[in-house]
Image (cartoon, coloured by chain):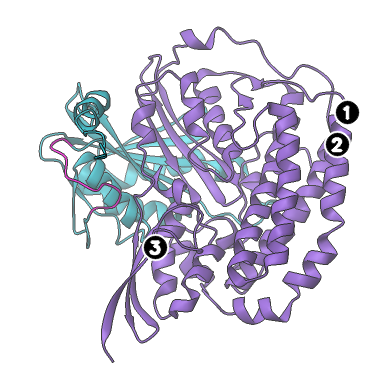
Chain colours: A purple, B cyan
Amino acid sequence: MRELELYFGPQHLGMVGNFSITLKVEGDRILEATSKPGYLHRGFEKLMEYRTWIQNFPMVCRINVVEPDSMEMVYTMAVERLAGIEVPERANYIRSIYLELARVGSHLFGLWAYSNLLGFDTVAQWAMYHRDLILDLFEELTGGRVYHIYIWPGGVRRDFPDGFKDKIVSTLHSIGGCVPDYDATFFNNRLFYERAKGIGKITQGEAKRLGAVGQVLRATGTKFDIRKVEPYAAYDKVDFGIPIREDGDAYSRIWVVRDEMIESVHMIFKLLDKMPEGEVYNRVSNPFKWKIPKGETYVRVESSRGELGVYMVSNGGDKPYRVHFRTPSYTHGLIILEKLLKGASIADVGNIMISLYVVAPEIDR
Amino acid sequence: MNNSLKQEIKSMFKNIKVIISKDKSMLINARKDQLLAVLKFLKGKGYNHLALISCIDWEEEKQFEMVYVLTPYLQRSKKVTDDWRLHVIVKFRIPRENAEFITAIPVFKNAEPYEREIHELFGINFEGHPRLTQLFLEREYKIPPFRKDFDTRKYVKEFFDNIPFVTEKK
């Protein structure tokens, strides 16, 4: 049979954002795949060197469109560590609740994308609707629906408004009440099982060798979660589990996502119960006049897609000298995808890509 | 354990500088030819997750600094002690002119895209890298764009201001 070169993308169902792959195919089997990122390269890391520490916030959250909140968190943590800024206890709890809400929202978005791709349109509509309910909460809390810029060096920008706790609880209850419906129509559905089982399989050893994190690694039976390994915000104050699966295929990955969502909801309830009273913001000096002491640091958080880190260098000036983000989609989208696509069929390309949970803007930055 | 690891590294490698900083990272300054040996040693010690390869352009000192961030893949939360929360940051200084470095792919497979990115954005050549092709950018630049002497604002003005608007004929 004749070998063909097939250009897949940059716009297709398999990806949130623009990202293309060049496939070398024979029949409908893929012999070789080459990732082609770059459609969303905005050079944020370079642009940050031209702006003051605080001016960078609007850019930081645009690196990951689906879940900008952990981006804010990791940047804030790095600045706080370099400048030695303390955070009040209540702000830590609020940060954790906020990040978990963002995780649920992001997973619902992922569920929308995945079910939409496989043709489960009903489930996709539900997931989008439920994500919208969470965006409503964000809108009330921060004023923005998608980009919030809520976490700030020294704490969070404002306290919960009156009655906000109850709103979180009722929203999460109404989403949680639909879990049986989701299970019946999607997760336990034979069609989903047949479509995802055994697709894009990766072993634990290979996943570790290729630098996998997040669901991709946890679906191979590794309990690796930054929230446990290096607790930040208030994650060391609550008890929560890390869902894992053993098989390492698309089916396991999406089940890990489902279990994580439920775990996050439980965690938010626990955090809300324990939340102390007090200040949410430590007064810091005028951020427009900040000069951050010389130093370097690497901090990391668990975003909805895995380990998200930032390496930050300050030379004592009012702007960062170098910022480099380590995003989870980077290794997933560039080398693990290439590996998993080898030998797969063309019909599974989107399926594998979306089960790896890759967001293109995160790769390009 | 941190201190014993520090001593071990110091006795294994000559002329190596090891500092443990306040924020629980171990900063190692090594020479270019020690790259593979140091990474292999740390991987054997349990720091088996290469989180990031970064590069810093120290323009005034006419040097590039290659940065490798290593952390362990930990499994059970109960056994996690402070020692294992250490981030190992290995750094190498190389001259800025005709920058050459060695690939880390023999030790860490996932070094591949990071090195490609640094090759493209800083113009450092990695000896032994199988495909140093373009990753993000669509055109060639005289000065690699992430170097400090590349002025983004000037470039944007020169490049994008000269693109004429579309004028439709009526």
- Secondary element under disc 3, as helix, strand or loop, is loop
- What's the residue at 33%, 44% (across, down)? B11
Q: Chain of mark 3?
A: A
Q: For label 1, count other residues whose C-alpha is less than 10 Å away and answer few (under 14), some (14-19) or many (20+).
A: few
Residues indicated by labels 1 and 2 sit on the same polypeptide chain: yes
Q: In this picture, which residue range is highlighted in magenta?
A: B134-143
Mark 1 is on which residue type? Gly
Residues indicated by labels 3 and 1 sit on the same polypeptide chain: yes
- Secondary element under disc 2, as helix, strand or loop, is helix
Mark 3 is on which residue type? Gly
Compared with A328, A216 (above or below) is below
To which residue does mark 1 refer? A163
Whether residue B121 appears in this view of the structure is yes
In the picture as drawn, the residue positioned furthest to the bottom comes out as: A1
To which residue does mark 2 refer? A167
Residue B90 appears in which quarter of the rendering? top left
Q: Position of residue A7 (x, y in %)?
A: 33, 68
- Quadrant where the C terminus of chain B sits is top left
Q: Position of residue A256 (x, y in %)?
A: 67, 63
- The earlier-in-sequence mark between 2 and 3 is 3
Q: For label 3, count other residues whose C-alpha is less than 10 Å away and answer few (under 14), some (14-19) or many (20+).
A: some
- Distance between the Cα atoms at labels 2 and 3? 41 Å
To which residue does mark 3 refer? A9
Q: Horizontally, is B68 left or right of B35 in the view?
A: right
Q: Chain of mark 1?
A: A
Compared with A58, A118 (above or below) is below
- What's the residue at 79%, 68% (across, down)? A183
A9 falls in the magenta region: no
Compared with B150, A329 (above or below) is below
- Secondary element under disc 1, as helix, strand or loop, is loop
